[in-house]
Amino acid sequence: MARVVGADVWKSGWVAVVTVDGWIASIDAYDTMADLAETESAADVIAVDIPIGLPIAPPRPADSAARKFIGSRGSSIFPTPPRDVLEVDTYKKALAFSRKRYGIGLTAQSYALRHRILETDAVARADDRVVEIHPEVTFRALAGRPLAFSKRTWNGHSERRRLLSGVGLSIPDRLPDAVGSVPADDVLDATAAAWSAARYASGDARTLPDEMPLPGFGEVIWY
């Protein structure tokens, strides 16, 4: 049986949806990616909504391809900064450094994820089960078209939950206390990640961009 994990960042760590042969087996919360990977040592794939493979210089091909693929929801793809930018200890200094070295700015959203990006990068280097996905890419693939509504709206939430149910991933109405306070859109995103993880495990997944970039220009987004 294929056991896979889809994981999404939320303010207190990670929410992880585990599926076995395409059915939701559990929904859990973890403080760190290392905790998740260790606990789920039996999983075949761990698909995460976080950049893996930091570019030596922007822009990262995977980000550009994902924006084009999802169309109107393209703003949900934050540009992935190079490692040396993320390692600067304040946003103000990182912004100045990025402008000086690469000639471009740095979004606050990208910098806010720096600890999670670097944390995941360290785990992924040692664990080839960890692959990158993006939930909006997954939902676009499930729908067969760009989605019209944000996941934070009622219409967007309902459409995404309906798409997941259509492939057998029906999220329970009541979650365990440990994850019951996780925002609904993060649970949806982790469940979408689990769908892409299962496709990766079966060999059916595709990538953005279609071909692996040259070494040092970032990894691909799987869906």
Image (tube, helix red, strand yellow):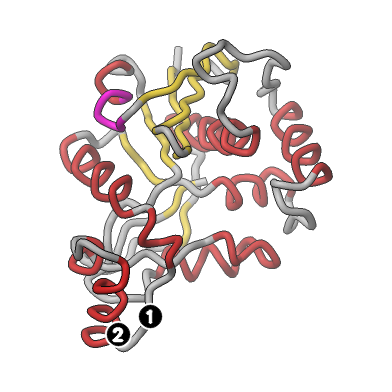
Callout 2 crowding tier (Cα within 10 Å): few <14, some 14–19, many ≥20: some
Task: State the image quarter where residue 98 is shown.
Answer: bottom left
Answer with left or right where residue 111 lies relative to residue 158.
left
Residue at disc 2, secondary structure:
helix
- Residue at figure coordinates x 24%, y 40% from the top left: 124
* Marks 2,1: beta carbons within 8 A: yes
Looking at the picture, does residue 68 appear above or below residue 183? below
Q: Nearer the viewer, residue 31 or 219?
A: 31
Tag on residue 99?
Answer: 2
Q: Is residue 81 magenta?
A: no
Magenta range: 32-36
Q: Position of residue 210 (x, y in %)?
A: 46, 61
- Quarter the N terminus occupies: top left
**Magenta stretch: dominant secondary structure:** helix
Q: Position of residue 39 (x, y in %)?
A: 30, 16
The disc, 2 or 1, on the residue closer to the chain's N-terminal end is 2
Label 2 amino acid? Arg
Mark 1, residue position:
105
Task: State the image quarter where residue 81 is shown.
Answer: bottom left
